Structures are given as structure tokens and as C-alpha cells.
Amino acid sequence: MTRPKEAEAPESAEDFLRLALSASDAKARARWARAGLALDSTDLDPDTQVLLLRQLYLSHVEARRLRKAVEVAEQMASIGPLRDIAHHDAARVLAALGELSDAIVQQRLAARHAPAERRSFHLWSLGTFQHWAGDVDDALRSLRRAERWATRDRAMIRAHSAYVRLTADLAVAELDAIVTALQKSPAREGYGQWLLGMIAYELGDRRKAAVHLRAWLRRHAAPDEAKTITLREELRRARTALAQIESD
């Protein structure tokens, strides 16, 4: 009887990266990422180094070691490849820590270093952080820039701008058309549903707001740790709005 072939031991940085990517928990992810990063620098190209560091970053996020996650993201940004992603990773953790000023600094860097295909996303994220920080004017400016660069997400960005304006008691031109466009977009079942719910809430349509926000919260009933951190403020606002609706 032939014995089953043993799995080959990882040797290259790419081997360790594959193991980190397929790890089932934060501890294993960190172990494989560190093993890959410990290889001789001549065997570690910058792209793979950044990808291994990102796995280490994610392991810190999953384990709620957020300060460590920021440190790793900053290390990623210093290397070069995927610099925009690294700055965004730092920004979203800083935002989760409540350090919005620092998050905005990092997100500006993300937008500055972003390739064209990711610039809209980073400007949109910048506008979101600025809104959370209470800077409506800068948020709207960033969202307008995001809309100009957008290809797929223009309907959501326009709706997000409308939501920001509504929270500041500012008029929104063509609001019905903006909402209709979002309802027809593929994003209506994802982040767009949160926007539809919050817009309805700001307009005083409690029934419609409740329908959208309950559905959105059901979709995020058991999110992974990284998503919980990324959507922390949205989750808080949705729950606060629903609590207010249910208390009326």
C-alpha cells in the first residue's frame, strides 16, 4: 500500500503568502505571514512583502489589535506597491479608533497615491470620514471629486452626497431622480440599501427607512471583524435610527 504523499514544506515567500491567505484564523494568518517576512530580503520582492504585511495587518484587525494594525499599515505604505491600499487600511482602523483627524490624513494620502481605477473609491472614503468628523463642506467637495472619477458607483456617490446634504439641512436638487437611480443600480442590495434607509430616515419616511435599514442590518448580522470595523459608524447610525423609529 502506498503512503499518502506529504505536503511539501513552504519554502518561498509566495508559499507562505498562499498559506496566510488560506489560514482559518488570525493566529495562523499571522504565523504564516511572519514566516514569509522572515525570509532573506533577497528572496522577498516588494509586492510580496506588502501582501504578506497585509495578511499580518488583517490578523491584527481580526484579533482587535488595532494599534498594531495601524503600525503594519504604515510599514506597508513605506514600501511602495499598493501604497493607496496601505494608507486606506491605516485610515479605516484610525477611524474605528475614533481618531478621525488622523484617519483623514491617511485617506488623503490614499487618494493622492491611487491609480485612476481606485481614485473614486478613495475620494468617496475621504468624503465619508470628513462627514463623520462633521466637516460637511469638505465632505461634499470630496464626494464631487469622487463622482467625477467614478465609473460603476456614480449612483451611490450621488446618493451619499444627498445624504450628507440632508444631515446638514441643505437642499438636494433632483433628489427623487437620485434615489430612483440608486434603486435601479446593482448596489441597491449592498451599501446602497443603507443609503436608501438613511435618506428615507432624514426625509421622515419612517416606514421606508425601517424596511431598508432592517434588511441591511440582517445582511450584516454576523460580519467579520474587518467589516465590523469598516462599517462601525454606519452600523451605529442604522441602529440609532431604528431605535428612534421603534420608540415613536
Image (tube, rainbow, N blue to C red):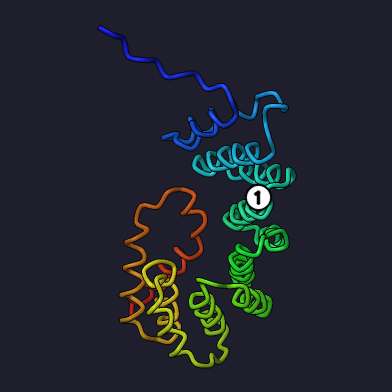
- Badge 1 is on which residue? 82
Residue under the image location 70 percent in, 57 percent down: 106
Q: In terms of depth relative to the viewer, which is nearer, 60 or 80?
A: 80
Residue under the image location 47 percent in, 89 percent down: 175
Say left or right for 76 vs 169.
right
Residue under the image location 54 percent in, 29 percent down: 16
- Label 1 SS: loop
* Residue at the left extreme, as displayed: 1
The relative height of residue 42 versus residue 161 in the rendered view (above or below) is above
Question: In the image, residue 212 lies at what x, y percent?
Answer: 34, 73
Query: For the image shown, how many numbered marks are present on the structure?
Result: 1
Q: Quadrant of residue 191?
A: bottom left
The relative height of residue 65 versus residue 220 in the rendered view (above or below) is above
Question: In the image, residue 230 lies at what x, y percent?
Answer: 52, 57
Binning the other alpha carbons within 10 Å of mark 1 as few (below 14), some (14 to 19) or many (20 upward) gives: some
* Residue at the right extreme, as displayed: 78
Question: In the image, residue 148 lies at what x, y percent?
Answer: 62, 77
Q: Quadrant of the N terminus?
A: top left
Say left or right for 241 vs 159.
left
* Residue at the top extreme, as displayed: 1
The relative height of residue 33 versus residue 86 in the rendered view (above or below) is above
Q: The residue under label 1 is which amino acid type?
A: Leu
Q: In terms of depth relative to the viewer, which is nearer, 182 or 26?
A: 182
Q: Quadrant of the C terminus?
A: bottom left
Question: In the image, residue 189 lies at what x, y percent?
Answer: 36, 69
Q: Quadrant of residue 133?
A: bottom right
Q: In terms of depth relative to the viewer, which is nearer, 101 or 116?
A: 116
